[in-house]
Amino acid sequence: MNKSSLIEAVRTFSPKEMKEFSEFVSSPFFNKNVNVVKLFELIKKNYPELDSTKIEKEKVFSKIFPGKPYKDSTLRLLMYYLYELVEKFLAYSRFNTDTFRSKDILLKELFERKLFKDFERIIDEANQELDKFNVRDNYYYENRYLFAEHKLSYLAEIYMGKYEKYLTKDNIQLFSDNITKFYLISVLKYYAITLNTMYLYNVKVDTEIIENILNNFNAEQFKGVPLILIYYRVIKLFIEPDNEENYYLLKDLIIKHDTELGGTIGDLFINLENYCVRQLRTGKQEYLLESFKIYELELKKDTYKTHGYMPNSFFSSMVVTASKLKKYDWLRKFIADYKNEIHEGSREAYYYYGMAYLENEEGNYEKALEYLAKSKPEEVYLKMDLRILQSRIYYSLVWTLPLQSLLDTFKKTVQNNKFMTDMRKNQYLKFIKYTNQLNNVRYKEDKVLVNELQMDLEKDEYFAYKLWIVEEAQKLAQ
């Protein structure tokens, strides 16, 4: 029972939601099965721990049906009924929190029942609320066009056959403008996501329809709709990667219109981050400082959080970027100030990784290893990052044989991982290959081998920590 969909869903409930769901289950409007209420009350008694030993099926059944022999099918049916109520409650809760969506449904009902006086009042209220709405995203324009559509339907009903009364320029223009803005924001947004996916995972997607739309796109027509211009520039980052002007135009648009972007602003900053990363991979080191500025901007504007937490990837990127720029004091303060914003499930692992990385960059290798030993991650990619950092520390300490052993183990771990993408595997295997060569070349003190290593590195594409290996090879060549 502990691993059932029912218990997993209840685990996500806040105390407030648990109280509301209790009222929901007990309401005869939603549920008339008293045994379902009993089942919920037993689960509720063990919330939030929901200890598996206290909600075993047999124990629960005996409390609902005292004196009766255990029947699994009966309990499973009750669990099914209760889970149905969970789903209805979640939908009901979402409906109640979405003011405009609930008004949209209400307007449909009022229209069908021909309650036009109330219809007029609700549609006026909805449009007045939208007028106060600062965010101008696809949600805003979707609701604008939905309410414009409701108004047209209403006018068509009361002026039946008198088209000149409601098919006016203003009414048609209002509907047309808002549905166009909603459509374009949605299309451009998901085209940007598609391009990013194609880049990251080397997948092919048929984008001919969207490309045809873009071929006829005139940015001048949408100067009053920042999000359309913003997503247009995001797309340009992918299709014109060498035109750096698109990046700075996008950055300026995001900063200028930040209050109008709502929840999309976090993803838009990530697009700026990713462009900096792509430019760095081509050797444009000036984008290291630029990416740091973007991270700082996200911290200042508090746009980096996901579900209330700092994403692990944001924290680790901040650590690596600040370290490369030798902003050690800044980074030490950042780790201390923001470590508690990392989700508790991975907080310690990332904190110790960050401290180990910092100590390594400052040349405190023994201290770095102490922090490294304390990091016990469950996340596979952090485990890989730890092995990379450990390899770099071993190399700096001239631990030739331990490094060789570590790299052999690292290689087997990567090769045997069934869930890692081929692109990731390739990145790690290249790091292992060249670090191994670097280790062997230093041990043999052979300048010819150093030159061969440098030529191989020059021919190869970007991979994680290639620059570090190139710099270490240059030291050996001197």
Image (cartoon, helix red, strand yellow):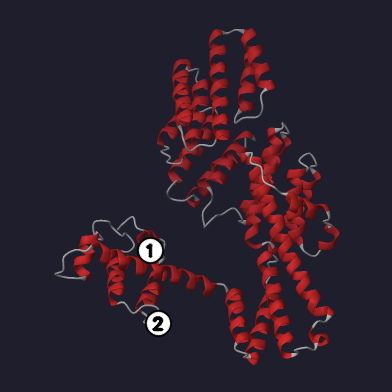
Q: Closer to the camera, 30 or 153?
A: 153
Question: Which image quarter is the C terminus in?
Answer: top right
Residue shown at the point (40%, 69%) measured from the top left? 84
Q: How far separated are the C-alphas under marks 2 and 1?
A: 21 Å
Residue shown at the point (53%, 25%) measured from the top left? 392
Q: Looking at the image, can residue 292 be seen? A: no
Outermost residue toward the front? 161
Amino acid carrying label 2: it is Phe
Image coordinates for residue 243, horizontal then vertical, percent: 80, 42
Horizontal side of 4 relative to 166 (left or right) equals left
Task: Please give the label number shown on residue 142.
Answer: none
Q: Closer to the camera, 383 or 139?
A: 139
Measured along the vertical axis of the image, is residue 178 above or below residue 400? below
Examine the image and state in which quarter residue 438 appears. top right
Residue shown at the point (80%, 65%) measured from the top left? 224
Q: Which residue is mark 2?
A: 29
Examine the image and state in which quarter residue 17 appears. bottom left
Task: Please give the label number shown on residue 10.
Answer: 1
Amino acid carrying label 1: it is Val
Circle 2 — which element? loop
